[in-house]
Amino acid sequence: MDRRSFLKTTAATVAGASLLKPKISRAATPPNRFVFVNMGGGWDSTYSIDPKPGMATVSQAPGLLRTYGNLNVWDWKPATVIGQPDSNVKKFFDAWSSMSCIVKGINLRSISHDLCAQRIYTGRQGGTNPDMATIIGFEKHKDLPVPFLLISGPSWAGPLGAAVGRVGETGQLRTLIDPASASFPVSWRPDANDEIDIETFHMATAERQKAIRGSMGYNQARIQDFEDSLIRADTLRDKGKTLNFGGGGIMGQVDTALQVFQLNLAGCVMIDSGYGFDTHSGNISQGPSQDGVFAGLNYLMTQLSTLDGSTPGSKMIDETCVIVLSEMTRTPRLNGANGKDHWPVGACLMMGAGVAQNRQVGETGDGMVALPLDLGTGATTGSQNLVSMGTEMFVAGVLTLAGIDSTTYFGSIPPLTALVG
């Protein structure tokens, strides 16, 4: 009998009641998994997904405009010399433009890093609004040990904090999973039998409380949540000991994210690009920094296309959506330090399962101003229903893409359905 089976049997015997209700398994519907990639600091989108060549009101870096169907992309480092390698921006779109969607012209209504980040991820400012990664984890992956795993990046859990697990800046999750890996001295660690005794006590206590005051309604549900959490924690400890948290940079984080998916520990993850994009001076560094990110994105998509999915014959790419976000973009023109300052317009790159393939949604016009658009088609002309796209509409659109009813979180605010394939 394995540890989990022993725990269930022992707790049930002590409490004199069945331990857990049977769980209903739900069929996965693409996109079932999500990877969020945070581009912290505010990227200059003209270096990649929002080029403005020849526009007098925009300082466009040298490079070459490349067209991939409906997508226009800026190649900041075209291979003009024989033998010089292509930029990673070009390599990425050469391979993945057919399943990519570019969203432009998201109105952030602020130039503060913190406020813009909160708005682009939660849709709103202030309060206790959860971010979209937390919502997706909560709504779609309640049965997993960590519905949303924050490997690195920002997070606003709001009232859904139980759905979020954090690796921690110094790898604290690794130590919680496996105390033997702690870098500090620990005077006592429970062995396997101790852990069974401790968890059996918790389970028996929960069953006792259920019998006394939690036989129905809210109390019953909360006690059941507690019992379920102990089983999920046990699963995380058992499987999580094989996780590799040691990889650095975007590719190391990608490896951790993919391993989490393979072990079925989480359904939604966030990683950080590992680069800083707050270029108030020396904006030219945006080129190599974004090139490094696109190398990581290419690696991520290649791995997703190689690794097996959750159903026979499928690959992870068939059920995984990747969303690349920064809290803001940069001003259209260079400042006196050859940098660019904060600009209250968002741009997003999405690819993979469920995404509207090879589609541009929204646009920025002269001076990088966000243009009104049709929320259903993404077009900025030829429609009677053009509206200014707020962050609420964008986040509601991502929830719709995930198969979640956005009205639960945004009421009557219309979602940006143009990004849905």
Image (spheres, rainbow, N blue to C red):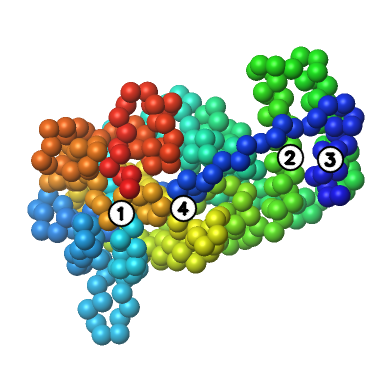
Q: Which amino acid type is shown beneath numbered disc 4?
A: Thr
Disc number for residue 7: 3
Q: Residue at x 86, y 38 (%)?
A: 9
User: Could you tell me how far apart the alpha carbons at marks 1 and 2 are, in whole angstroms?
Assistant: 39 Å
Check the image and report above or below for 242 versus 411. below
When asked about the image quadrant of residue 389, the answer is top left
SS under mark 4: strand
- Mark 2 sits on what residue? 231
- Mark 1 sits on what residue? 357
> Can residue 280 be spotted in the picture?
no
Mark 3 or mark 4, earlier in chain: 3
Mark 1 or mark 2, earlier in chain: 2
Q: Nearer the viewer, residue 325 or 419?
A: 419
Q: Residue at x 37, y 47 (%)?
A: 326
Mark 2 or mark 4, earlier in chain: 2
- Mark 4 sits on what residue? 320
Within 10 Å of the Cα at label 4, are there few (<14), some (14-19), or many (20+) other Cα atoms? Answer: many
SS under mark 3: helix
Left or right of residue 174, residue 120 in this image? left
